[in-house]
Image (cartoon, grey):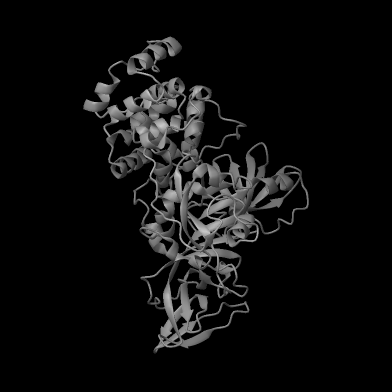
Amino acid sequence: MDRALQVRAILSTRSLTLYNVSLRSAQLFGRSTPFYIPHNLYYDLAHTLSTPTIFQILALSHITDYRLFDWLAVFGLNLDAISRLQFLIPRQQTTLLDSTVYDTHAWIPWFAERAETGPASSIVPLGHFLTWAPPERASELLALNKRKFLYAVVGERDLYAVPYFVPGSIVRADAQHSEAFRLGRDTNDKGSFFLLEHDFGWTCSRLTRLGKDRVLLHCPQRPCAERELVVGKDARILGVIDAEIRPVTPDIQSRRVQAKLATPGKPRLERLPVELTKLTDLLRRSRARVGLSFRDASSLSRWIADTLSDDLYFAAGSTLSDCEALSAPPRQVQKIITLCLLYCIGFEQFLLAAGLPLGREGREPIPDEFVPRHLPNRNRSPGITGANGAPKADSFFAALLNQWEEIPLFLRFSLDEITGLKNFSLSELFWVGGDRAPQHPLLADSTLVVVIRRARKPSPDTGNAVCEQPLYLILKRDGSYLCGRCTLDDGNLIVHGYPGTAAKTQQFRNGVDAEVVGQVTTILRKLR
């Protein structure tokens, strides 16, 4: 539908015309303010392909009582889909992810429990338990979450996280346990990693308590880098890391944008503020946290603009500098999205810091026929249970939800980037939660692995550390699976054990007793 006609149709659902909207915007906000909606908006939309400013879109939301993020989607700005780019931007420092689901009325492809699954072995395809079901609204799935977690992506130069985590790993932090640690309670957190916000960014580190509010960042690889921090003054404990989505193939890292970034200088240390309320302070500190110069940020904004095929996402270095000097936000929404992606700022957080009246935005969703919400064409399969609503208490999905407590829906547009697979599907997921004697320590307490089926020939032994060698999924002739390191030797498939564990090396005739299903690209595992 033509965008001007689309806006006209949306206004008609509220018995409004553009003349009425323009008049009301002048009455509510003032004709001389940036919130004023001109009476020639339809002409601009039809002939210049321009997008209204963030102020005008907020005025449209207020006058129609339709949600701000739905109006952004009408103008081609789907924040949920655009947020996938945050996984492709190279990060020197560990950074927080924006885990907000902006369109809570979006349709999500979903699953249902199979009625008859039969006995399951320790490792099985996830399709053994689940099958496709009719899609669900995002709001219905979010209602199943038991509580909220924080998410971060590990940076390449996080001294305290590497090598326990790898660059690009997505870690989940539980804020409830961090409060117990801060108060000095016995939480059995020895060996746990914490997500910390400190004076020049974020990090994942083990902590040693030195006193009431004093902690030591633990860095066994480089003892000289260990650092004492005072909680509440120059550090804030955000949560205990309890889960990880770990990439285990170099291909996933190579999919990220290859940008030539300058070596970050030594950060200027500042006392950690309690709250950042001004836009200029938020931008300045956020840029310092991610370790970007204006030149580097501008270079990455060019990549964002090219990826989204819209030059409005590009921000010159002078523009980025002006944003930190001026208190007013950019008028173009695309520039705001670019700043949020570059500096790891939530979109709502940005608008609040800019002083925009978000309390006046609309509350109702725009009807599906007027906003681009894709409805997946999935028919209900025969022989399934619990297709809609809360899962049955004794079902596989209910047990999975009890274990993980939250469905990270904000990742749904980023699965290709996270797994390294194009057009990622359910057939590449395998449940490994029943394997009580895993062949590799990375598989201990793991729940799911992603397998690329076309990589069926084991790589030769490169002499790298054992933990850096690729993992494979092996199907035995009795129908059971193994997951671990393997090599080919004179027609024999050797599945290696791991030193210091109960897992023993096993040997099979390749193609007769066992065969390789594919290479593991990603592991989803619990750490607590």
Q: Residue furthest right?
A: 185
The reply to whether residue 390 is visible in this rendering is yes
The one nearer the camera, 432 or 374, is: 374
Indicate whether 351 appears above or below 172.
above
Indicate whether 371 appears above or below 414.
above
The one nearer the camera, 329 or 158, is: 329
Residue 244 in the figure: left or right of residue 314: right
Residue under the point 73% across and 47% down:
180
The reply to whether residue 266 is visible in this rendering is no
The one nearer the camera, 461 or 143, is: 143
Point out residue 389 in the picture as x, y percentages from the top left corner.
57, 49
Indicate whether 512 appears above or below 334.
below
On-image quarter of the N terminus: top left
Residue 289 in the figure: left or right of residue 50: right
Point out residue 185 in the picture as x, y percentages from the top left corner.
78, 49
Point out residue 309 in the picture as x, y percentages from the top left corner.
27, 41
Residue 340 in the figure: left or right of residue 447: left
The one nearer the camera, 65 or 463, is: 65
Residue under the point 65% across and 45% down:
175
On-image quarter of the C terminus: bottom right
How many marks on residues?
Answer: 0
Q: Residue furthest left?
A: 47
Point out residue 292 in the picture as x, y percentages from the top left corner.
42, 41
Residue under the point 28% across and 27% down:
4
